């Protein structure tokens, strides 16, 4: 395995582990406060942590860059996190939210193919079907536990927002070298997201935080997981492509359920383990297709 391939594997593994953990922070926080309160304080603390990069953003980014980062921040962070946090408060288990979010690869690959005027290959179609089957297996128990259809619409809407933001992020990162530096870009997005969250929570009187330690544990967990996961997601998107980054999300439902063992005391059912294997096979298939497409593209350009 080449150095670049090895780095890609490490980036992908880190993204899956960290991204999966974020769903647990939403469920833990929902037990202590209204979703608007949790989201507002998570976003405020995140903005404060990333504030040192704002002067850099002011120096390096022009008006167009600020607008683009604001749009990506609203889609990938503000709307996405709102859907996930409110879904947890409505009783949607973390594994189910991860399931819905992981259906994003199908939309990203199809949208990317349509935009490029090409058809999906048999390998890509097979990988998508296999991945969809894998994520469905991991959440059969959750979906059969009486989760309301209206509540399920929340993570679905979050997934659509993340898909749109991902495609825009990749589009605005081309050609290579034109993308906004990672940390200043995240700082701008965090600032916009905090304004969105506070502006949504204030009219409802949800800005006063509870004193429960569990609330602040959830906030801290969400801040660390959020900054790390978005940084990794944008890095993988910029270096490996939106389709590859999104494909890795197929692994998050099973990994989220495994995260729930030590944090929520849930024992994963056999279907979860089977789903992890199936999802892993789908990721391997889609990643293989991606590498083959890259080799063909390089050979054609040469």
Image (spheres, rainbow, N blue to C red):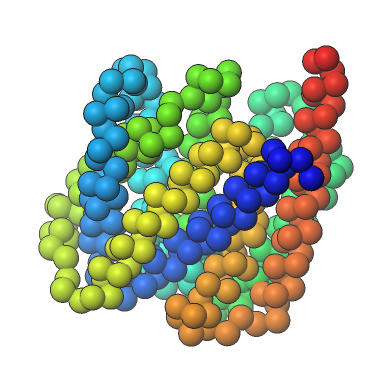
In the picture, measured across the screen, residue 64 lies left or right of residue 255, that is left
Q: In this view, does 76 lie above or below 229?
A: above
Residue at coordinates 45% horizontally, 78% vertically from top-left?
263
Residue at coordinates 29% horizontally, 43% vertically from top-left?
50
> Looking at the image, which residue sits at the far front?
3
Residue at coordinates 48% horizontally, 64% vertically from top-left?
21
In the picture, measured across the screen, residue 173 lies left or right of residue 58, that is right
In the picture, measured across the screen, residue 268 lies left or right of residue 93, that is right
One can see residue 252 in this view: yes
Q: In this view, does 20 lie above or below 241?
A: below
* x and y, in percent, of residue 134 in the image: 72, 64
Give residue 61's quadrant in the image. Answer: top left
Give 289 or 108, whichever is nearer the viewer.
289
One can see residue 99 in this view: no
Give residue 225's quadrant in the image. Answer: bottom left
Give 301 or 246, whichever is nearer the viewer.
301
* x and y, in percent, of residue 178 in the image: 50, 19
Residue at coordinates 55% horizontally, 68% vertically from top-left?
256
Give residue 14's quadrant in the image. Answer: bottom right
């Amino acid at each position: 395995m080449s150095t670049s391939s090895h780095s890609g594997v490490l980036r992908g593994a880190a993204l899956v582990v960290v991204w999966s953990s974020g769903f647990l922070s939403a469920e833990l926080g929902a037990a202590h406060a209204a979703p608007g309160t949790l989201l507002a304080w998570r976003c405020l603390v995140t903005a404060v942590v990333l504030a040192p990069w704002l002067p850099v953003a002011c120096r390096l980014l022009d008006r167009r860059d600020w607008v683009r980062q604001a749009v990506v921040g609203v889609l990938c962070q503000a709307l996405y996190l709102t859907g996930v946090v409110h879904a947890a408060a409505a009783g949607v288990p973390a594994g189910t939210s991860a399931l819905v979010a992981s259906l994003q690869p199908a939309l990203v690959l199809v949208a990317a193919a349509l935009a490029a005027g090409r058809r999906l290959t048999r390998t890509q179609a097979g990988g998508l079907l296999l991945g969809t089957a894998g994520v469905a297996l991991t959440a059969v128990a959750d979906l059969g536990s009486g989760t309301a259809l209206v509540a399920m619409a929340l993570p679905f809407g979050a997934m659509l927002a993340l898909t749109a933001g991902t495609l825009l992020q990749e589009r605005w990162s081309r050609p290579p070298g034109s993308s906004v530096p990672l940390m200043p870009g995240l700082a701008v997005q965090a600032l916009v997201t905090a304004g969105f969250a506070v502006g949504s929570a204030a009219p409802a009187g949800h800005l006063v935080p509870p004193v429960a330690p569990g609330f602040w544990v959830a906030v801290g967990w969400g801040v660390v997981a959020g900054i790390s996961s978005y940084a990794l997601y944008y890095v993988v998107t910029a270096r490996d492509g939106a389709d590859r980054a999104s494909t890795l999300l197929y692994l998050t439902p099973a990994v989220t359920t495994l995260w729930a063992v030590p944090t929520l005391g849930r024992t994963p059912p056999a279907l979860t383990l089977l789903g992890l294997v199936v999802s892993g096979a789908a990721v391997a298939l889609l990643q293989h297709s991606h590498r083959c497409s890259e080799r063909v593209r390089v050979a054609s350009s040469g």
